[in-house]
Amino acid sequence: MSAQNNNGAPKPPTPPDFHIEANKGSHVNKVIAVVSGKGGVGKSSVTAMSALWARRNGYQTAILDADITGPSVPKMFGVGYADLVATEECLYPATTVTGIKVMSMNLLTKQEDAPVIWRSPVITGALKQFWTDVAWGYVDYMFIDMPPGTGDVPLTVFQSLPIDGIIVVTTPQDLVSMIVKKALGMAKLMKVPVLGIVENMSYVKCPNCGEEIRIFGDSHVEEIAAKENIPVIARIPIDPQMTSFMDTGKAEYYESVYMDGIKDVLPPIE
């Protein structure tokens, strides 16, 4: 006989719990997913800068690169195949110059440009192993660099990992409202808090006069954020120096204050 409510009506079935246990060598305090509704918005750069802010402010920090088929985080931090430690029991993440822990598919291949041509079930299985088979140690903030869109991998992350909030990355283009709404809609369905929005490629600053040139048009981020009742964490310009540091594996040597606003939205460490 099915269970009933006090009024005699059948109780709805309990939804399945897809969460998976972390590796016994892990103690991850807060998990923040960095998402976008489309590719090419600089999500990996925002993930890197978020992690850099946390590490520079004394937090034990990690990055899980969930973009299995298009990983870019290891290159930004100058780590590779030789930096990953494996034992019979588990994997240990690579550690960057300043102590940020990184796990990515690119750390498992000797050639960083080798393509990962896998079907979705294999990709999502590998992603889960980044959580169950990697001994992360103690981590205050883990940032997850998500693949774009709302497909299998984002769904797996939201359902399987204990996500404490998401940061939405976008650009100042006419399609931005629709793109942001897709990301926010998925977060709402998954019951994951939205911490804020970052507008990347917001402007270019003239090196001579300092004027902000909006090559992608006027920003709509404040309007969208107000409508959705979420804060704007940052408006990040197109910065050739930042691109150069990221492309040459020296992300940690790049000094900026672009992501300082993240301090107002990150959940506190318990």
Image (cartoon, helix red, strand yellow):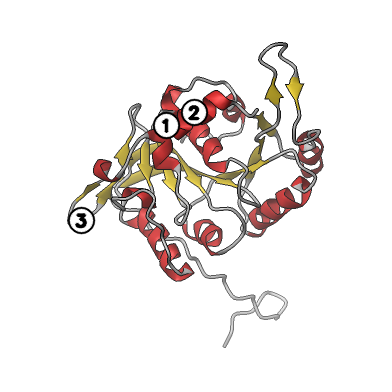
Residues at circles 2 and 1 in contact by the CB criterion of under 8 Å: yes
Q: Mark 1: few, some, or many residues within 10 Å (few <14, many ≥20)? A: few
Q: Name the residue type under label 3.
A: Glu
Relative height, residue 32 to residue 231 (above, below): below
- Tell me the crowding category of disc 2: few under 14, some 14 to 19, or many 20 or more residues within 10 angstroms, Cα based: some
Which residue is under mark 1?
248
Q: Real-space Cα distance between discs 2 and 3?
A: 38 Å
The mark found on residue 244 in the picture is 2
Single out the residue that lies furthest toward the top. 209
Outermost residue, left side: 88
SS state under label 1: loop
From this view, report whether residue 147 is shown above or below residue 141: below
The amino acid type, in three-letter code, at marker 1 is Thr
Q: Position of residue 230 (x, y in %)?
A: 72, 39
Q: Secondary structure at mark 2?
A: helix
- Identify the residue at image location x=57%, y=42%: 43
Closer-to-camera residue (119/117): 117
Distance Cα–Cα, label 1 vs label 3: 33 Å
Residue 150, position as x, y percentages in the image? 61, 59
- Residue 98, picture quadrant: top left
Question: Which is closer to the viewer, label 1 or label 3?
Answer: 1
> Of callouts 1 and 3, which one flags the residue occurring earlier in the amino acid sequence?
3
Q: Which residue does the image show at 31% across and 42% down from the upper left?
A: 80
Q: Residues within 10 Å of mark 3 (few under 14, many from 20)?
A: few
Checking the image for residue 89, the label placed there is 3
The quadrant where residue 115 appears: bottom left
Mark yes or no: residue 29 visible. no
Where residue 202 sits: x, y (%)?
70, 31
Q: In the shown orientation, is residue 58 left or right of residue 145?
A: left
As drawn, is 172 to the left or to the right of 127? right
